[in-house]
Image (cartoon, helix red, strand yellow):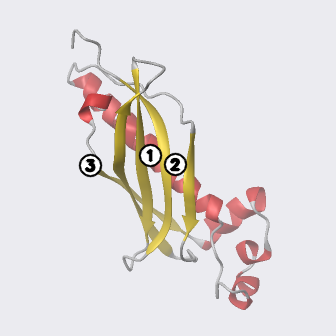
Amino acid sequence: MRFLEDLQVGQRRELGSYTFTAEKIIAFATQFDPQPFHLDEEAGRQSLFGGLAASGWHIASACMRLLVLERQQEAIEEAARGEPVAVWGPSPGFRDLRWIKPVLAGDTVVYANVVESVRPSDSRPEWGIVQARNTGCNQRGELVFSFLATAFVPRRSQGE
């Protein structure tokens, strides 16, 4: 269960991985970030990246997908056990977004989430606020992506 009271600073969740194939990189870039080094292998090789590079927004989108899928799976498992399911609120934003190293065609990024702070909301007592660092490391273990996310998380009712 992921109510505010269940979360602790330092908790880590492994979110899964995503492989950035040339086809996926080009498809994403065609629709959302049509820069030459995301669209064409030769242009990528001649760029600062040295190869067909995934858009930073593609890297972030893959992370978001895995975050959502992990939480959905957790909710299914909680419901199957008859436990209350914490439905998280919206995110008021994020900060410190960094694309640290290029992600090139063929790279697999493994994503993780680590809780950095947990506190009750001052203005909404039924909610808390959690900040977590989301990271991605390539298949060589190199950090390639990071951001600090903030989310509203429900608190347990007094009867639970």
Figure quadrant of the N terminus: top left
Q: Secondary structure at mark 2?
A: helix
The disc at residue 82 is: none
Mark 3 vs mark 1: in front: 3
Figure quadrant of the C terminus: top left
Q: Give the vertical position of 1 relative to 36 (above or below).
A: above
Residue labelled with disc 3: 11
Location of residue 141 in the rendering, given as x and y in whole percent from the top left corner: 36, 76
Quick one: label 3, few (<14), some, or many (20+) residues within 10 Å? few
Quick one: label 2, few (<14), some, or many (20+) residues within 10 Å? some
**What's the residue type where badge 1 is placed?**
Leu
Residue that appears at 36% across and 34% down: 119
First of labels 3, 1 by sequence position: 3
Location of residue 19 in the rendering, given as x and y in whole percent from the top left corner: 49, 67
Residue 98 picture quarter = bottom right
Residue 143 picture quarter = bottom left
Residue labelled with disc 1: 67
Residue that appears at 42% across and 54% down: 133
**What's the residue type where badge 3 is placed?**
Gln
Residue that appears at 55% across and 58% down: 96
**Which residue of the protein is positioned furthest toward the front in this rendering?**
122
Residue that appears at 62% across and 70% down: 54
Mark 3 vs mark 2: in front: 3
Q: CA distance from mark 3 to mark 1?
A: 15 Å
Which of the two residues, 127 or 68, is positioned nearer the viewer here?
127
Mark 1 touching mark 2, by CB under 8 A? Answer: yes
Q: CA distance from mark 3 to mark 2?
A: 18 Å
Residue labelled with disc 2: 64
**For this view, does 116 lie left or right of residue 104?**
left
